[in-house]
Image (cartoon, rainbow, N blue to C red):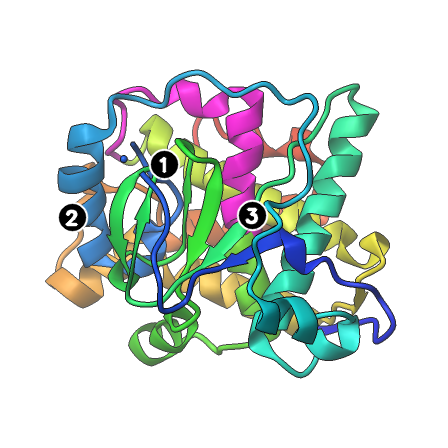
Amino acid sequence: MRFRRDAPLDPGQVTDVRGRGVGPGGFALGGGGLGGAALIIYLLFTLLSGGGGLGQLAPLDDQQVGRGDTPAEVSTACRTGADANKREDCRIVAVVNSVQKFWNGVFQRSGRQYRYVDTVFFTDQVDTGCGLATSQVGPFYCPHDQLVYIDLGFFDELSSRFGVENSAFTQAYVIAHEYGHHVQDQLGVLDRIGNDRQGPESRAVRSELQADCYAGVWAAHAVETGLVEELTQADINQGLDAASAIGDDRIQEQTQGQIDKESWTHGSSEQRRRWFSRGFENGRPAACDTFSGAI
């Protein structure tokens, strides 16, 4: 996966607080199947106990892109696709730009307004609208403040712990999955989860698989956004490998030595791989209805 060298980047869609902290207290989604058992425990016993539900969606009109508080280094270093081909943080900026440009187009064609939101870079820990999160949580989306959070060191851990290649498209899949939750948030899908947060047929699992599918839909149109130069079959295979590696069954088997379906929050390796593939092959959000029938 490479980016067009002359494609302009918008670093204003990223807030960089690496070495600092940010935020308020809610309920986070997206990281459980990425960060492993530690994250599952964190979500269930820390965030969910004090979250008070997902609440109402904020108005979608009159919103601006980004928050405009990106530190100078990323703001000045990440200007074009050429920078994204050289630096990891600039690469994430490019992916965020591409994913949000795609969903903005989808929303416009549906007569809706997409709300652009930031990805927050942090190190070690960060104070968020969903509570204090550490790097062990992995990437996640917080509906309370409508931000995506990621410690970029996560990708090295994903590689060392789960054998996933730390490639450009692996990183893009993770980011696209989290923005899939933001899309769900704007459409009111997250309100449907309620207290049904565990189990192989739970709404939580259905939500995560839909976010995987949405990531595949974006991938099908990534080149059309004008930022991505090309996606190869090898790139897609890396995304499929990442989706498979972070299934609940694979993580439980590796960390606990046994599989407990009733505690699943994200779905099996096979399910995650299949729903990402479905989104990529169909290229339509309508193909991502994980809430009807068996999954």
- x 39%, y 65%: residue: 151
Which residues make up the magenta segment? 176-199
Q: Nearer the viewer, mark 1 or mark 2?
A: 2
Amino acid at dot 1: Val
Q: Secondary structure at mark 2?
A: helix
Q: Earlier in the sequence, mark 3 or mark 1?
A: 3
State which tag comes first along the sequence, 3 or 2. Answer: 2
Pick the quarter of the image with the N terminus.
Answer: bottom right
Spatial distance from mark 3 to mark 2, Cα to Cα? 26 Å
Q: Secondary structure at mark 3?
A: loop
Left or right? Give the position of 43 relative to 104.
left
Give the answer, above or below, for where 33 lies relative to 196.
Answer: below
Q: Position of residue 143 (x, y in %)?
A: 42, 33
Residue indicated by mark 2: 41
Mark 2: which amino acid?
Answer: Ile
State the residue position of label 1: 205
Q: Which mark is residue 118?
A: 3
Q: Looking at the magenta stretch, what is its main secondary structure? A: helix
CA distance separating discs 1 and 2: 16 Å
Q: Position of residue 277 (x, y in %)?
A: 60, 51
